[in-house]
Every structure is written in structure tokens, then in C-alpha cells.
Image (tube, rainbow, N blue to C red):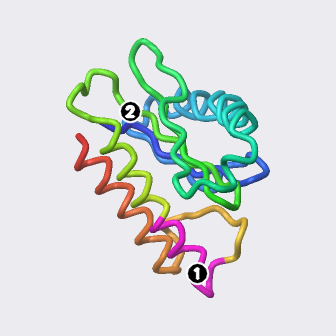
Amino acid sequence: MAVCVAVIAKENYPLYIRSIPTENELKFHYMVHTSLDVVDEKISAMGKALVDQRELYLGLLYPTEDYKVYGYVTNSKVKFVMVVDSSNTALRDNEIRSMFRKLHNSYTDVMCNPFYNPGDRIQSRWSVSACRAFDGMVTSMMIQVC
């Protein structure tokens, strides 16, 4: 099951981060931020090939004993990081890829909303409906995978 979803800006600060269970929130924040080094390594290793490629799924960034961390990067260098419970063996790579595509589409809807200021955190308590829809999509994605 997905236990943490994060959207990281080009400058490596979090635009959105959500984790369940909340008692391990600091642990997941740490995992997300340490995975950014691996994301940067993969992007620089791909070099020019990444620019030509439509698929921006980075795959498994690193596994730990309890979790697996996956990554995705957009053309504008916004990074999506997903932490998945290792005990869920039914979750395949193509399902993770599909989840990242849904996340990217929902993120695009937030960016296209005229009431959202690019660079601001994506928070569901705002009156911007796209932010609430994004948070709802992440919640349903976490529940669906559970």
C-alpha cells in the first residue's frame, strides 16, 4: 500500500506531502528528502535522453526493509515521490506507473487553475477546488492501493 505521496518543486522544497499513518510522518518526510539525491542522480545519468523521452517514470529509487521508494519527474523538473509498503507484493511496476500518471494529471489540473499561485503549497483546506480535488485523488489512491 502507498503510505506517502510527495510533490517536490524544482528547487527541492515540498509542494505537497501526505502520509498514512500520521505517527510516522517525520520518517516519511526523511525518506522523501533522501530520495531526492537518487532522483537527481538518475536525471543526470539519463542526460539528454530524458529530454527526448515522453515517459518520465524513474522506477524504484531505493528499497528499505519495510518500504520501497519510487520516483517520477515532469518536464518542468517537478518531482513526484511515492513510498509503498514492501509487504504489498501484488503491486506491480505498471500499476505504480499508472498511479504516477494519475498524480501528474491531477497536478496539471492544479497548475492550470487560475486561482492557484505556482510555487505555493497544495493544501486541501484552500478554497481552490483543484487543490481539494488533488488531495481527494491522493486519498483515494492511497485507499485504493490499501
Q: Position of residue 23 (x, y in %)?
A: 43, 31
Residue 118, image quadrant: bottom right
The residue under label 2 is 84
- Determine crowd level at label 2: few under 14, some 14-19, many 20+ residues with C-alpha closer than 10 A: many
Say which residue appears at 44% left-offset and 58% top-offset.
103
Q: Nearer the viewer, residue 47 or 6?
A: 47
Sequence-wise, which precedes: disc 2 or disc 1?
A: 2
Say which residue appears at 53% left-offset and 22% top-offset.
62
Q: Quadrant of the C terminus?
A: top left
Q: Which region shows up in magenta?
A: 105-116
Q: Position of residue 84 (x, y in %)?
A: 38, 32
The residue under label 1 is 112
The stretch drawn in magenta includes residue 111: yes
Q: Nearer the viewer, residue 98 or 18?
A: 98
Q: Nearer the viewer, residue 91 or 43?
A: 43
**Residue 88 in the figure: left or right of residue 47:** left
Q: Nearer the viewer, residue 139 or 24?
A: 139
Say which residue appears at 26% left-offset and 35% top-offset.
91
Residue sitting at the far right: 11
- Tell me the SS state at disc 2: strand
The stretch drawn in magenta includes residue 124: no
Answer above or below: position of 70 versus 64: below
Q: Position of residue 51 (x, y in %)?
A: 69, 55
Answer above or below: position of 47 versus 98: above
**Residue 31 in the figure: left or right of residue 19:** right
Say which residue appears at 74% left-offset and 53% top-offset.
10
- Determine crowd level at label 1: few under 14, some 14-19, many 20+ residues with C-alpha closer than 10 A: few
The rendered magenta stretch, by its main secondary structure, is classed as helix
**Separation of disc 2 and disc 1 at Cα?**
28 Å
- Tell me the SS state at disc 1: helix
Amino acid under label 1?
Cys
Q: Quadrant of the N terminus?
A: top left
